[in-house]
Image: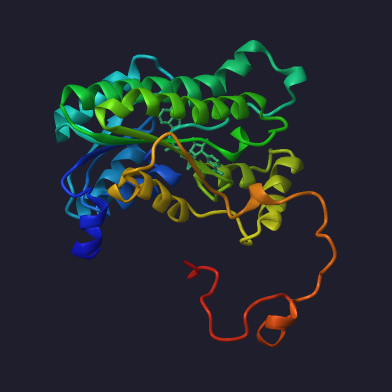
Amino acid sequence: MSHELTDLLGLAGRTALVTGAGSGIARATAHRLADAGCDVAVVDLDVAAAERTVAEMTAKGRKAVAVQADVTNPAAPAAMVRRAVEALGPISVAVNVAGGTAGVNKSFLDLTLDEWHRPMALNLDSTFLSVQAEAIAMVRAGLPGTIVNVGSTSGVTGAPNLSPYGAANAGVIHFTKTAALELAPYRIRVNCLIPGTHWTTGTRAHMNNPEAPTSVREFFAKSAAATPLGDLGEPEQTAGVALFLASNLSSYVTGTSVVSDGGILHTTARPAFGGGTVPEAIRDHVDADRSPRAASPTKKERP
Ligand SMILES: NC(=O)c1ccc[n+]([C@@H]2O[C@H](COP(=O)([O-])OP(=O)(O)OC[C@H]3O[C@@H](n4cnc5c(N)ncnc54)[C@H](O)[C@@H]3O)[C@@H](O)[C@H]2O)c1
């Protein structure tokens, strides 16, 4: 990364804490933060996965520590912050990514209260407790800071068969707004990153599980096909948004949510109003499938 960009980001020499960073979007975010000059506390339930990420960080010349924590344990967020600070010094960046469906995917008509609570504990309770512990540590250390929570597009649209996951993530988006207002006087910004469906360890496990109902496997194929940018996301594509929200590039942004979903939230079941052909202005330059004819970035290279 060039010195100019590092200066603009303003992250060099700071300590960041990332939950869930043994894998997926969180691990990719830990890499972006390390590339920008942060030392990183890698928090995960799976300590072996956390240690793998730590090894990747130290190979880049950054300091890093693996912190084992189950963020559904109410005592864990305060303990993970304490451990991170002991190992790496005061934190001023936190990205709360750990979350998921907690294995609950069925109609709310069949849900027990315990099943309703599990995604709430994993996504909403954990975010509340993590932001609380992180903010207290930042204020006590006298540091301005940035906190990024991770929600889900399921918290924006209806989420059939994922009602508690959707409601918990709607809560994460809303809690982010309140936390931002309460923490603004202490110069701590709080924002939310909202990913659409991504290819990660978690989603690949569902996709490749022969025991998963066909409908679950179809969900990924159909979601990819319905995504305007043409595929599900890769963690690295969305980690850059977390980096932006954590960095000085977003120094006037707080309480807001940024969606990284390939455009799917803007799609509609309604057909387009007429059209269907390639616009005349570009007809000579694209093929029938609308791919540009001139040398152009491949999908993998697309910025
Ligand atoms: N992948 C997607 O399609 C997608 C879409 C929208 C939102 N999200 C959200 O993004 C976040 C990350 O998803 P992902 O697919 O990158 O994750 P992932 O499944 O690849 O990795 C999750 C990581 O979190 C850890 N973890 C799980 N439970 C934990 C707990 N209780 N305490 C601490 N660590 C725990 C796991 O060990 C793992 O390393 C989640 O909050 C998820 O809800 C993901």
- The image's colouring method is rainbow
Q: Give the x, y percent position of residue 160.
A: 72, 32
Does residue 4 appear in this view?
Answer: yes
Q: Is residue 181 left or right of residue 17?
A: right
Q: Residue at x 32, y 29 (%)?
A: 184
Q: Give the x, y percent position of residue 241.
A: 42, 50
Q: Is residue 230 above or below residue 113?
A: below
Q: Is residue 17 left or right of residue 127?
A: left
Of the pair 56 and 166, the residue shown nearer to us: 166
Of the pair 10 and 231, the residue shown nearer to us: 10
Q: Residue at x 62, y 85 (%)?
A: 293
Q: Is residue 192 above or below residue 174?
A: below
Q: Quadrant of residue 278?
A: bottom right
Q: Quadrant of residue 187?
A: top left
Q: Is residue 137 above or below residue 240?
A: above
Of the pair 19 and 179, the residue shown nearer to us: 179
Does residue 130 appear in this view?
Answer: no
Q: Residue at x 20, y 56 (%)?
A: 7
The quarter of the image holding the N terminus is bottom left
Q: Give the x, y percent position of residue 300.
A: 51, 68
Q: Is residue 118 left or right of residue 215?
A: left
